[in-house]
Amino acid sequence: MPETGPETFDIAIIGAGIAGASLAGELGDAARMVLLERESQPGYHTTGRSAALFSETYGPPAIRALSRASAAFFDAPPTGFAAAPLLSPRGVLMVARGDQLGLIEETLADPTTKGRFRRLDARAAGEMVPILRTDYAAAALYEENARDIDVHALHHGYLRRFKSAGGRIETDCEVRAVERVGERWHISTSKGDVAADIVVNAAGAWADELGQMAGARTIGLAPKRRTAMMISPPDGVDPSAWPMLVDIAEAFYMKPDAGKLLASPADETPSPPCDAQPEELDVAICIDRIMTACDIDVRHIDNRWAGLRSFVADKTPVVGFDDGVPGFFWLAGQGGYGIQTAPALARLAAALVREQPVPRDIADEGVDAVDLSPARLTAV
Ligand SMILES: Cc1cc2nc3c(=O)[nH]c(=O)nc-3n(C[C@H](O)[C@H](O)[C@H](O)COP(=O)(O)OP(=O)(O)OC[C@H]3O[C@@H](n4cnc5c(N)ncnc54)[C@H](O)[C@@H]3O)c2cc1C
């Protein structure tokens, strides 16, 4: 950035995680744009810490609709977007103990996921994940269509698309102040100042802090820490063809990953926005739950990490122009679903930034801009 006089853009997007990157990639060459990221690596925070699952049955109804609307992009991204498929087969096996059988019936009765699950008895579940203890599982649901996402390929596909359309990415560039001056935004960063007609807030766990910098009302964003770790399967066991094993009440999960097992206690501990780190207690809880359900002796953790999943009260993303602050656009609150919904959310956000209607195929899945608008949260 130049030392003197702010360079002017049509749109400045703050945050180069999957939210900011995908919107930047979708907006393409429609505007002079800059993507501002505090870290030296885009994806350093939540985007680089996910479990990388795509499931059309996960999350509240708006998330499911956005995930369904994202499937076509994942299955057939634009030519040259990624060198390999973005999704690969995985499957999810949701296990229930005897005292959790009611949750199996509840899930099967849900009309929005009708036909997506197959009910299995304990023996059939054990055939899919042979270390599942026969005295633990009473029954299970199998979702065949759940798949692994190549998060790096998705994220970098969008960043490449943005750059090849002439967009600029500034890393190591912390936004410190955002001020409306006349018809424009003046953005002060650790690398100098820029000006823009529109500011997009894709700051992940920091979205409410950024909103407050710009003078917007809070959306009540609550970052919640989730812990993950890599453990080794029992000696001589290759788990690569197993489905992801998930407790039906989401008290833990375990997913094959490059010959190892990614495990999580599925914790949701409120946290201020920060570089989240795993707590020993959450790691211990995870190991205990996995060893109770599975025949595995976890003595060593290969790698552990934590990330912040940021939610507003209705667990639905926040997308749209702020109703009180002109030219300030929100793309936040993706919670635990920001990767699998990114393709549809980015297209939807790009349409709303351009003041166009929700794309037809996304609206056809039941997504309404009003349900995502920041106004639903900031109205007094
Ligand atoms: C353990 C775990 C498992 C998950 N599993 C899944 C899954 O299986 N499937 C799924 O779809 N989702 C999953 N998620 C959720 C998913 O990872 C998130 O929804 C998504 O990554 C959020 O993306 P984001 O771009 O909003 O946030 P981030 O990736 O955190 O990006 C926000 C960026 O904004 C930058 N920023 C903030 N403030 C400033 C500032 N002032 N100046 C400049 N830059 C700034 C930050 O540095 C950061 O890079 C999981 C999350 C976790 C933690």
Image (spheres, rainbow, N blue to C red):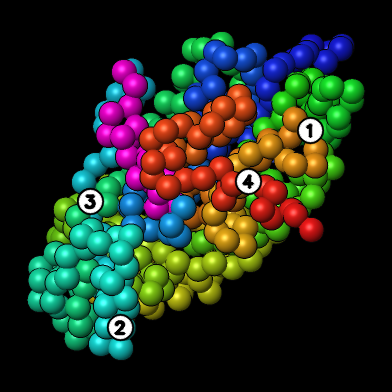
What residue does disc 1 label?
Answer: 326
Kindly identify the amino acid type of the residue bearing the numbered disc 2: Gly
Q: Is mark 4 within 8 Å of ligand 1?
A: no
Residue 334 shows in this picture:
yes
Q: Looking at the image, is mark 1 or mark 2 nearer the viewer?
A: 1
Q: Is residue 70 above or below residue 97?
A: above
Q: Could you say where residue 347 lies in the image, as x and y percent from the top left?
A: 48, 31
Q: Earlier in the sequence, mark 1 or mark 2?
A: 2
Q: CA distance from mark 4 to mark 2?
A: 35 Å
Residue 356 lies, in percent from the top left, at: 57, 27
Q: Earlier in the sequence, mark 4 or mark 3?
A: 3
Q: Residue at x 74, y 53 (%)?
A: 378
Asked if ligand 1 lies within 8 A of label 1, the reply is no
Magenta stretch prevailing secondary structure? helix
Q: Which mark is residue 373?
A: 4
- Label placed on residue 102: 2
Query: Where residue 118 sits in the image (x, y, percent)?
Result: 17, 65
Q: Residue at 66% of width from left, 53% of height from top?
A: 376
Residue 145's tag is: 3
- Does the segment drawn in magenta span residue 378? no
Q: Residue furthest bottom?
A: 99
The answer to whether residue 373 is left or right of residue 19 is: right
Lower sequence index among marks 4 and 2: 2
Which region shows up in magenta?
A: 63-79
Packing grade of label 2 (10 A; few <14, some 14-19, many >=20) is few
Label 4, label 1: how far apart the Cα atoms are: 14 Å
